[in-house]
Image (cartoon, grey):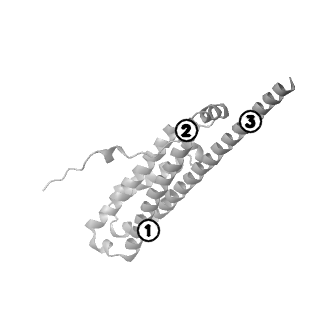
């Protein structure tokens, strides 16, 4: 009788220890994802902060290109108003897709703004414009890197909460899958080249 009681108590203690270790592992992985998300947000914020300077520089040379300036201002305001930036966005694929769409719209606007420099040779040689363009290129590279790191962390977390027996603990404890950054639809289409 005493031996059976000790075995039962030992089994219960083992289950509690297993639950605790698995739970703590999930918390660590989730915090890693949230940390990587913060890095992505930081890079996007730096880019958003750079945009007004870039617009102001281009405006000095291309004042009549008001449509492009308006599109960028609208894209930038969408990011501030319609998308709530905190780590909970990574738990909701719909909000995450909305965030990614808003960032893509801003990227497209910046691309159109930079394309204006082709029409204004004096703008292409302006020191402020060249410096801002260089900063923007560096930020786009860092954004890409941080997005990849975020996706890697999200993959590790998502894998750990789906593996057995951890999936049972994850479901009981409310751990949810994190969303991934996805390639844009137009990225799947090969560009047409004409000679």
Q: Nearer the viewer, mark 3 or mark 2?
A: 3
Residue 76 at least partly seen: yes
Res 121 → quadrant:
bottom left
Q: Secondary structure at mark 1?
A: helix
Residue 25 lies left or right of residue 105; in this view the side is right
Residue 25 screen position, x and y as percent: 65, 45
- For label 2, the residue is 177
Q: Earlier in the sequence, mark 2 or mark 1?
A: 1
**Looking at the picture, does residue 169 appear above or below residue 111?**
above
- Please, which residue is most extreme toward the left here? 195
The Cα atoms of the two marked residues, 2 and 1, are separated by: 34 Å
Residue 26 screen position, x and y as percent: 63, 43
- Picture residue at 51% right of the left edge, 45% below the top: 155
Residue 66 at least partly seen: no
- For label 1, the residue is 135
Q: Secondary structure at mark 3?
A: helix
Residue 87 screen position, x and y as percent: 59, 47
- Picture residue at 37% right of the left edge, 70% below the top: 60
- For label 3, the residue is 14
Q: Earlier in the sequence, mark 3 or mark 2?
A: 3
């Amino acid at each position: 009788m005493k031996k059976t009681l000790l075995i039962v108590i030992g089994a219960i203690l083992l289950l509690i220890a297993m639950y605790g270790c698995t739970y703590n592992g999930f918390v660590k992985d989730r915090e890693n994802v949230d940390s990587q998300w913060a890095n992505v947000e930081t890079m996007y914020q730096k880019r958003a902060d750079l945009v007004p300077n870039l617009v102001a520089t281009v405006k000095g040379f291309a004042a009549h290109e008001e449509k492009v300036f308006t599109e960028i201002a609208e894209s930038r305001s969408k990011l501030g108003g319609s998308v709530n930036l905190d780590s909970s966005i990574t738990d909701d694929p719909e909000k995450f897709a909305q965030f990614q769409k808003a960032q893509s719209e801003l990227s497209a606007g910046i691309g159109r703004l930079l394309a204006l420099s082709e029409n204004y040779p004096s703008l292409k040689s302006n020191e402020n414009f060249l410096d801002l363009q260089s900063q923007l290129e560096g930020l786009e590279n860092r954004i890409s890197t941080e997005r990849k790191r975020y996706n890697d962390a999200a993959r590790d977390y998502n894998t750990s909460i789906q593996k057995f027996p951890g999936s049972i603990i994850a479901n009981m404890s409310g751990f949810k899958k994190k969303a991934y950054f996805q390639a844009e639809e137009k990225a799947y289409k090969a560009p047409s080249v004409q000679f």
